[in-house]
């Protein structure tokens, strides 16, 4: 029964909604979650908005019937309704002392350990910036998951857009998976190592002169929600064709200590209807002349981005750290507990061609290394490189309510923001979940 | 332990609330950022060249756009006699690489080109080629050669653009009559009767020197031409192949030595010139070198022919800038021209980098203090001494690039600030700080000066005000000169904003501002 409960948990939570109605084989549950954050920021140049924010407010419900489980939660944080998870799931114990789970609906992509750990169970106020910039969130899709004590394999297929509301074009499709092996996995200790991968064929984009431009925006906030702006670390990539995510992860936990980390890599391939663009450009006396000249002036280059993080936690007192076989993630604090945590995160959104000159006044890279009136287009991406260190302390009064405090130092290296180098954030959170 | 944790949590909450409820509100503040951002400063060597430029200069934009057809003999003679410090112009090149002083790349607005020439290569082009004669009077170029060249001309022809016409052909155009049709109140028969030509840079310099065009009995300018010596043994094809860019045919030599005569209406003012390099695609790739050479040929290149270091900007009530090392100020919006300027002139002739906000090829798109500082750095790195920001206000309604915080950053760099272009008293009052008179501003540390009264000022005791420019491009020279004299920025001894221990003396500047229309009458228009 415990195993079934674990299998049935929503990925955004590692506990069931608390209020339960049960009749025969059917069970309906309802619960809620609230996160209230307060933050004070200090920055070199661009100020962040210190203050308080209702970061998350949700109603969550589930219904289970024999091997079936249905889950939905709805957010209204920020005063706006937002679609969170909603899915149906079939669970069946298998021959290998494990479980087969088939799931369909709207929920997290299988990749990235951090993105598959409920924020309510996270040991920091925010997930690592690298997973927000380079990882993938919820998608509309179907997945098959197998897991037992040793193995975990979760893979599926999803769309690129949830509501098919792209401006124009095909919705896009992605296949992805996360695979773990747990050489050590007992009640007291777990060590898992794994990889994940995702291939997405980008769908949808803007159409100009009968040419579709599929864009991808990647970015992160400074590991905070009170001012969750991504303007400081962001890049918009044009002419996206395919997006490949590859990741690796490690996790170790015992009752008093955990360590985990991920490496993330994102490869973005580009494609465009160059000839049509060239053809459209041949409409005035200043046109490019030849297709070859146009191509030379408008190079298209694939982009690569890297990131990763390491997190450590030490339980001063309280319930031991737990691990979910079903989701391959660390559990949250349960019962009265006090822990201290630390994290280092790196996010690399700079993919700059050597020798290019960047003008802040123009917000433009110049391939020749100096400013020109009519330069060739640059393929450099200057989204920003981020190094961030966080230390925190978390206290849970019981399984339902906890308070958290983090200090985060962020160092930014972005050509566009030469004076925005160092950011400091002191944050607190009050959270309850039932 | 639980109590401690609760206590810690409460203390944290109280601390956070205290932090976040304090009165100091942080937000992006350009005023503060302008002071925080690091601004590159001008080097001592470049400051020396900067000081060639007179402070509070009145720059006659295109000679005049209000009173006379712009960038013509009439406009520049008028500006000179009015007492403007500089005659402003725009540099282009004709097909034969004569350096023009002409604004629009397309000649349709300011000439009758659409009536004189069709949208095709001038029908007289072949006759022009035939007009070159050998010593024995025979035709120099063969018909086959001419036919081939004509075909090449057709291939590179851009209708109505100055670059497509030989200077000899441009002289067929009337650059004055259009003004009478568009500026009815300022229309004058002389602008049409006295043929106003598309100007060459040499013409502009001649007007600044107190000369005028040499005209024949019919009132047409005298300007003969021949093949340059280095091309006299070549066919048109060989000349074309010898050119850096085939569409330009720089083989014609005009006889400038006989092109001008002393202007009998010259009143003795000797203004400088302030020509602008246009977009790189408008001009031949060696345009900056052409201008360098042209200044050389006119004796106006201070690198090769410097003036006396102590030559005054004003002497005996006359403008004397044309006889100083500040006689030429170059300007440009374009990155390419600026880079070439830095290679050829190497910062030794005053250079103004012009600012425009937008998304064009050379516009400033990131108009924050950070972006502004970046452009100042670019300008300084490329040998500039002056920043020329656009200003708002009717009738042009340009983007505002000279907010007080922007003027402050320019001042911080040690560069001169020459905003453009002025049409009204309201604009002059705004940027000369008159509206800030009597109040404390954020930029007083660098911008505020005290102006003593003179016999000409409208005030009788010293005034203290922040000044957001060091000179300016004006379409109303008469109004601007009057304003500067009335407000004590001309014909006075003033604090030098670049040197705390120096006085800037322009007390010898002309104190009388003639009536604009009377000057035109006097000049015969």
Image: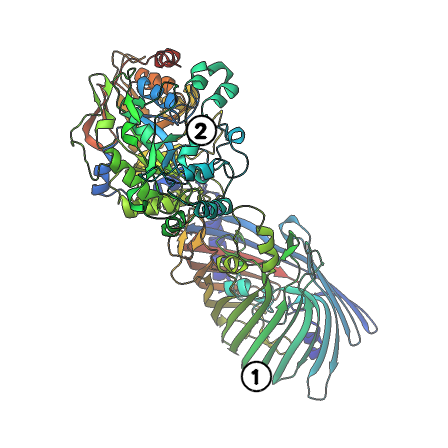
Q: Disc 1 on helix, strand or loop? A: strand
Q: Which residue is mark 1?
A: A182
What residue is drawn where x is 59% and y is 74%? A197
The quarter of the picture where the N terminus of chain A appears is: bottom right
Location of residue B313 by image quarter:
top left
Same chain for the residues under marks 2 and 1 in the image: no
Q: Position of residue B18 (x, y in %)?
A: 46, 46
Label 2 Cα neighbours within 10 Å, binned few <14 / some 14-19 / many ≥20: some
Q: Position of residue A162 (x, y in %)?
A: 69, 61
Q: Position of residue A105 (x, y in %)?
A: 73, 66
CB-based contact (under 8 Å), mark 2 and mark 1:
no
Name the residue at the bottom extreme: A95
What residue is drawn where x is 18% and y is 32%? B307
Label 2: chain letter: B
Cα separation between marks 2 and 1 = 90 Å
Q: Disc 2 on helix, strand or loop? A: loop
Task: Specify whether residue B468 is in view.
Answer: no
Decide which of A186, A110 is in the foreground and name it: A110
Label 1 Cα neighbours within 10 Å, binned few <14 / some 14-19 / many ≥20: many
Decide which of B144, A263 is in the foreground and name it: B144
Q: Which label sits on residue B486?
A: none
Task: Specify whether residue A373 is in view.
Answer: yes
In the rendered image, the vertical position of residue A270 relative to residue A77, given as above or below: below
Q: Which label sits on residue B172?
A: 2
In the rendered image, the vertical position of residue A236 relative to residue A303, given as above or below: above
Q: Position of residue A241 (x, y in %)?
A: 60, 65
């Amino acid at each position: 029964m415990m195993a079934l409960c674990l299998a049935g948990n929503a990925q955004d939570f590692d506990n069931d909604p608390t209020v339960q109605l049960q009749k025969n084989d059917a069970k309906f549950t309802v619960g809620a979650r609230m996160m209230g954050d307060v933050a004070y920021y200090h920055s070199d140049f661009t100020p962040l908005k210190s203050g308080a924010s209702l970061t998350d407010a949700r109603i969550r419900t589930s219904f289970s019937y024999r091997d079936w489980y249905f889950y939905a939660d709805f957010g209204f944080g920020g005063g706006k309704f937002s679609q969170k998870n909603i899915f149906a799931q079939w669970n069946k114990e298998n021959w290998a002392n494990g479980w087969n789970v088939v799931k369909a609906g709207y929920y997290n992509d299988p990749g990235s350990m951090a993105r598959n750990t409920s924020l309510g169970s996270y040991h920091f106020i925010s997930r690592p910036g690298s997973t927000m910039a380079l990882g993938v969130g919820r998608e509309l899709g179907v997945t098959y998951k197998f897991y037992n004590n040793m193995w975990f394999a979760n893979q599926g297929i999803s769309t690129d857009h949830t509501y098919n509301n792209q401006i124009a074009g095909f919705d896009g499709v992605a296949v992805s998976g996360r695979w773990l092996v747990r050489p050590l996995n007992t009640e007291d200790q777990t060590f898992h190592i794994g990889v994940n991968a995702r291939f997405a064929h980008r769908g949808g984009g803007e159409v100009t002169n009968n040419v579709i431009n599929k864009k991808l925006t990647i970015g992160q906030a400074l590991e905070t929600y009170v001012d969750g702006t991504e303007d400081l670390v962001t890049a918009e990539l044009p002419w996206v064709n395919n997006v490949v995510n590859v990741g690796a992860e490690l996790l170790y936990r015992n009752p008093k200590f955990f360590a985990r980390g991920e490496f993330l890599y994102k490869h973005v391939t580009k494609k465009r209807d160059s000839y049509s663009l060239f053809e459209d450009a041949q409409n005035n006396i200043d046109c490019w002349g030849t297709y070859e000249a146009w191509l030379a002036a408008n190079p298209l280059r694939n982009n690569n981005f890297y990131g990763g993080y390491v997190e450590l936690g030490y339980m001063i007192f309280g319930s031991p750290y737990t691990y979910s076989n079903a989701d391959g993630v660390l559990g949250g604090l349960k019962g009265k507990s006090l822990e201290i945590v630390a994290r280092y995160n790196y996010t690399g959104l700079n993919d700059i061609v050597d020798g290019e000159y960047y003008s802040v006044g123009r917000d433009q890279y110049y391939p020749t290394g100096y400013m020109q009136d009519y330069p060739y287009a640059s393929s450099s991406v200057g989204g920003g490189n981020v190094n961030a260190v966080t230390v925190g302390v978390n206290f849970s009064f019981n399984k339902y309510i906890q308070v958290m405090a983090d200090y985060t130092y962020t160092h930014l290296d972005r050509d566009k923001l030469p004076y925005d180098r160092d950011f400091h954030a002191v944050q607190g959170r009050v959270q309850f979940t039932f | 332990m639980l109590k401690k944790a609760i206590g810690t949590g409460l203390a944290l909450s109280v601390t956070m609330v205290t932090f976040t409820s304090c009165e100091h509100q942080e937000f992006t503040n350009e005023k503060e950022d302008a002071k925080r951002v690091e601004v590159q400063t001008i080097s001592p060597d470049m400051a020396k060249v900067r000081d060639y430029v007179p402070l509070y200069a009145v720059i006659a934009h295109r000679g005049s756009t209000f009173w006379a057809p712009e960038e013509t003999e009439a406009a520049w003679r008028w500006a000179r006699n009015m007492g403007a410090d500089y005659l402003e112009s725009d540099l282009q090149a004709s097909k034969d690489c004569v350096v023009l002083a002409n604004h629009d790349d397309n000649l349709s607005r300011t000439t009758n080109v659409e009536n004189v020439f069709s949208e095709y290569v001038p029908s007289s082009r072949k006759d022009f080629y035939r007009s070159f004669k050998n010593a024995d009077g025979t035709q120099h170029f063969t018909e086959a050669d001419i036919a081939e060249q004509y075909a090449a001309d057709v291939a590179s022809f851009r209708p109505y653009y100055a670059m497509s016409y030989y200077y000899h052909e441009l002289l067929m155009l009337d650059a004055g009559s259009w003004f009478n049709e568009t500026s009815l109140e300022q229309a004058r028969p002389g602008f049409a009767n006295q043929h106003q030509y598309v100007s060459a840079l040499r013409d502009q310099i001649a007007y600044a020197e107190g000369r005028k065009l040499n005209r024949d009995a019919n009132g047409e300018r005298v300007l003969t031409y021949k093949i340059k010596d280095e091309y006299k043994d070549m066919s048109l094809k060989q000349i074309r192949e010898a050119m850096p860019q085939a569409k330009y045919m720089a083989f014609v030599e005009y006889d400038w030595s006989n092109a001008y005569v002393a202007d009998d209406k010259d009143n003795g003012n000797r203004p400088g010139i302030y020509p602008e390099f246009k977009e790189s695609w408008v001009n031949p790739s060696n345009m900056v070198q052409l201008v360098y050479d042209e200044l050389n040929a006119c004796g106006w290149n201070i690198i090769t022919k410097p003036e006396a270091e102590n030559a005054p900007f004003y002497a005996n009530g006359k403008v004397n800038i044309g006889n100083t090392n500040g006689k030429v100020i170059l300007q440009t919006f374009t990155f390419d021209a600026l880079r070439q300027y830095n290679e050829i002139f190497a910062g030794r002739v005053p250079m103004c980098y012009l600012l425009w906000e937008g998304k064009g090829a050379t516009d400033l798109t990131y108009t924050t203090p950070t972006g502004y500082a970046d452009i100042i750095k670019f300008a300084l790195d490329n040998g500039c001494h002056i920043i020329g920001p656009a200003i708002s206000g009717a009738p042009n309604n340009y983007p505002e690039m000279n907010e007080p915080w922007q003027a402050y950053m320019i001042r911080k760099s040690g560069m001169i600030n020459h905003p453009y272009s002025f049409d009204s008293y309201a604009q002059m009052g705004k940027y000369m700080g008159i509206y800030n008179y009597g109040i404390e501003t954020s930029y007083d540390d660098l911008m505020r000066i005290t102006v003593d009264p003179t016999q000409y000022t409208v005030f009788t005791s010293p005034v203290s005000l922040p000044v957001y420019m060091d000179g300016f491009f004006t379409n109303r020279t008469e109004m601007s000169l009057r304003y500067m004299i009335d407000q004590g920025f001309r014909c006075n001894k003033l604090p030098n904003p670049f040197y705390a221990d120096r006085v800037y003396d322009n007390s010898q500047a002309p104190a009388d501002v003639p009536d604009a229309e009377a000057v035109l009458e006097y000049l015969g228009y």
